[in-house]
Amino acid sequence: MLVEQHIGYAEPKIQSVLSELRSRVIQLDERVAERATKAQRIVYLIDRIFAEVKVQKKRIIVRVFDVDTPDPKQLLRHIGHAARNGWQHDKELYIDNLESLDESMPFIEASLRLILPEVSEEPARRRPCPSSVAPTQMRGDFKDMAVLNIPAARVRQGDLTLYTTALKVSDLIQPGFYTVETLDPANDDDKGYQRLLNKGRAKKLAGYVMKGQDARDAFLPTSVFLATDKSVPFDPSTNTISIDTIEVGPFNVVDGQHRLEGLKVAAEKDPRVLDFEVPVNIAIDLPTLHQMCHFLIVNTTQKSVDKSVEQRIIARLTDALDIEDMPSLPKWILNTVEKGEIDKAVRYVDYLNDQPESPWHNRIRKANDDTGTGRINQSSFAKSIVKYVLTANNPITAIRDFDREKRIFLNYWKSIASILDEDRESDTLYKYGGVELFCQFSIPFFLKLQAAGDYRVETMECALQACFDNLEGEYAGVGHPEWWRTGGQAGRLNSGALRLVAHEMTRALNSASMTETIQV
């Protein structure tokens, strides 16, 4: 039995204290059930857990609810990371002898009383104190809980057996169905492996699910990965599994804790979410160490969607915003779609890449393109355009004629290339450094041209050349093609240095237009 394994983990002195603790907690009420979970934990519950025991070698930690019980010796310690971790118990007691057990029992009893109104209006019924607690006595009324019989497909991958199925939120969030073995940063003996719960992330998902209830278009297609080190009965004739939470639970969440927390929050606010079905993969006969390895595999081998693909999808959604019916979208995606900046930036990039006379012709690597020497990702170029070109302080946004804006931006790059890439060997100009620098510099440059309203290539060439001629100091070479060739100085600049170059270019641009005599 897992309980005996947990007891055996402690030193002999702590084992005797733990046996006494178990006996006293069980006798508090005849309905109290004891259940062993992973990582040396034992929980005590009546439908809801009121105490969690963490077994360590030299002491016992008991986590309980925060209750208004006198604590003159300040035995009750606050768990600072409980809220971040999503734990329901935020107080804990340290027990290492019978005296500290005596002092701790009032807090455990108070924690039990806190949940009794939720499970029954009957007064607590004490059990006679047994000399030993047999495993069959530890279940309490949980033996009467219904067993879930659900359709499932059995999947075998080497030694791993998975059951792929779907569960309603109402089943997933029932007490004791799952647990999250979070790594406790304050406990050196902790054997958990999950990251801390991000409440904000779970809250965003809950908002998305609730918003989609009216339109019935919320969806979470990615499966939750649960695991247990026990077996789950499977009937191949009907392709069904039988889940008895008392026998196999709680399941460990290997992947999907934020989805489950978000669904739990959503269900508390909107009961319709209780019928929402979630795809679930259940791994059986999987030791805790193997579960930890699977967590590591899932979270280090998955690759997020390519940014270029993401930009294309957002651009298409923006284009269809007022034309087609849109599904419910998470707020941050909807805001990006409605702004339209990504759509416009991608169209800028496509225009530069597609025009035969453009210096960028076929130099930009679009979504799913094969990599090529001397080319920049669409995602990097579009990001710089959003950051510097499509801003309120860039005069090009005031034109409000997209075709003219694109031609002006193309003329800008023609003028840059005519000065810095006469022999088509300035490869660094067409990588991150060139894009980042000249997108930044477009703000003061277009401000200079705005008064005259002249955006022809020859006008821009003259203004750029005058700027380069006025550059002095460390970055004076920026106006020479050699500076931009492979192995040249441009390739060694980071984003901070590029900002300094843009600042010096702006100074030189303004200096070139000043007269020798300034009257104030």
Image: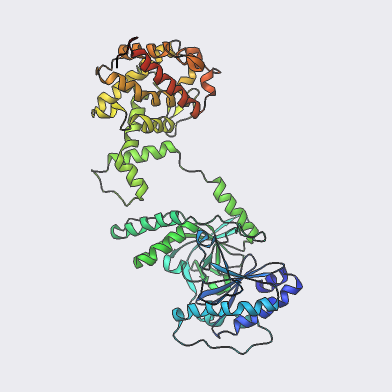
Task: Report the front residue among 337 and 158.
Answer: 337
Q: Residue drawn at (47%, 70%), measured in percent from left and top?
A: 174
List x then y, in percent, for residue 29. Answer: 55, 85
Image quarter in which the N terminus is found: bottom right
List x then y, in percent, for residue 186. Answer: 62, 59
The image shows residue 181, relative to residue 383, as above or below, that is below
Using residue 188 as the reference point, say whether residue 342 is left or right of it.
left
Q: Residue drawn at (49%, 19%), measured in percent from left and top?
A: 427
The image shows residue 120, relative to residue 285, as above or below, that is below
The count of marks equals 0
Using residue 445 as the reference point, say whether residue 56 is left or right of it.
right
Q: Which colour scheme is used?
A: rainbow
List x then y, in percent, for residue 195. Answer: 55, 54
Residue 9 in view, yes or no: yes
Image quarter in which the C terminus is found: top left
The image shows residue 87, relative to residue 328, as above or below, that is below
List x then y, in percent, for residue 34. Answer: 59, 77
Residue furthest to the right in view is: 12
Residue 431 in view, yes or no: no
Query: Which quadrant of the structure image shows residue 64?
Result: bottom right
Task: Report the front residue among 422 and 494.
Answer: 494
Residue furthest to the front in view is: 520
